[in-house]
Amino acid sequence: MRATARAPAAGTVLNALATGRGSAFAIDEYVHATVDLDDAGEVTGEVADFPDADTTLIEACVETVAREHDRDVGGTVRTQTAIPMAGGLKSSSAAANATVLATLDALGVEMNREDACRLGVQAAREAGVTITGAFDDASASMLGGVTVTDNTSDELLAREEPEWHVVVFTPDERAYSADADVARCERIAGTAQVVEELALDSRYGEAMTVNGFAYCGALNFDTEPMLDALPDVRGVSLSGTGPSYVAVGTREQMEQTQTAWAEYEGTTWLTTTQRAGAQLT
Ligand SMILES: Nc1ncnc2c1ncn2[C@@H]1O[C@H](COP(=O)(O)OP(=O)(O)O)[C@@H](O)[C@H]1O
Ligand SMILES: O=C(O)C1=C[C@@H](OP(=O)(O)O)[C@@H](O)[C@H](O)C1
């Protein structure tokens, strides 16, 4: 019983740590998962090229799906990706979604993608890799496009399919979401509510930029990369709890921003929004 799936990474419009409400958009970069099920009783995870990576999340995803469908399984789960872990680009949500879809397929059971996504969120909570459950990031990755969610109830508030060019800058350091200073984020709840109103009004670019300045302040990240991109882009923000930054706009605007960001140490790349979401492969 082997199955494979892929799920896209994502960038942030609104970080949910302040209010529990968040918004994210899928990008055209993927985490691939391969699930092999047997009757061994134990699930073992592996991240390709990272032998020391924490595999708790992907193992929890296989176990959560099996439990939900009253199955007692063991086996292996392996992810492969070029997306950095703990980079703010939702590799954890993408890894969970790809693993959940592959596990469902290996078990031969069907489930709608929104509910499948909620299983991955449940597993992420169990694995302790998230603060709010991150249904915002998980839904963007599972469904594609941009989503706005309430992570306190795992409810989808809005979803659209914008076509933006995207540029990403990932400094070399890492920032685990579970280590973020939530108390500092809660102090900017008023600003986060303004960002939510902009997002629910489909003003995603402006929402992103307000989110970026507010969360750079709360989480102590440099605002300089945002200033480099402004005023010419549609939106620019710190992604998630950092350290990556994302900007959206036209291809030409993204190329200009990439040139500016190439001056920093780290990796920059151009991509686009992704509208199809996670898929079996
Ligand atoms: N590609 C992956 N394969 C397996 N597990 C992953 C992967 N990416 C992230 N994770 C899990 O998620 C944790 C990092 O979560 P988080 O800090 O939210 O990262 P990100 O911002 O990249 O989503 C890792 O410690 C690991 O448990
Ligand atoms: O753990 C969480 O609840 C969250 C983590 C953040 O993302 P990253 O995992 O990308 O840092 C944030 O953007 C999201 O809204 C909620």
Image (cartoon, rainbow, N blue to C red):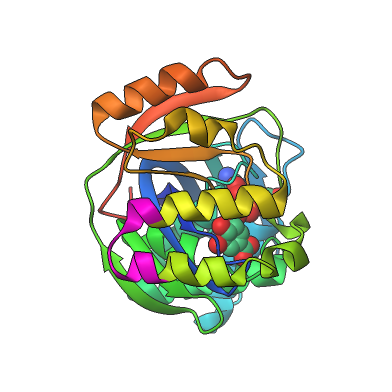
Answer whether residue 82 is magenta in the image: no
**Vertical order, 205 against 80 (above or below):** below
Q: In the rendered image, which quarter contains the N terminus?
A: bottom left
Was residue 198 drawn as part of the magenta stretch in this picture? yes
Which residue is outermost to the front?
231
> Would you say residue 231 is visible in this rendering?
yes
Residue 265, how many percent across, how many down?
A: 63, 19
Q: Main secondary structure of the magenta part?
A: helix
Query: Is residue 266 shown left or right of residue 268?
Result: right
Q: Is residue 254 left or right of residue 87?
A: left
* Residues shaded magenta: 197-206
The foreground one among 169 and 194 is 194
Residue shown at 42% from the left, 22% from the top: 258
The residue at 35%/51% (across/down) is 205
Q: Quadrant of residue 263?
A: top right
Q: Nearer the viewer, residue 106 or 162?
A: 162
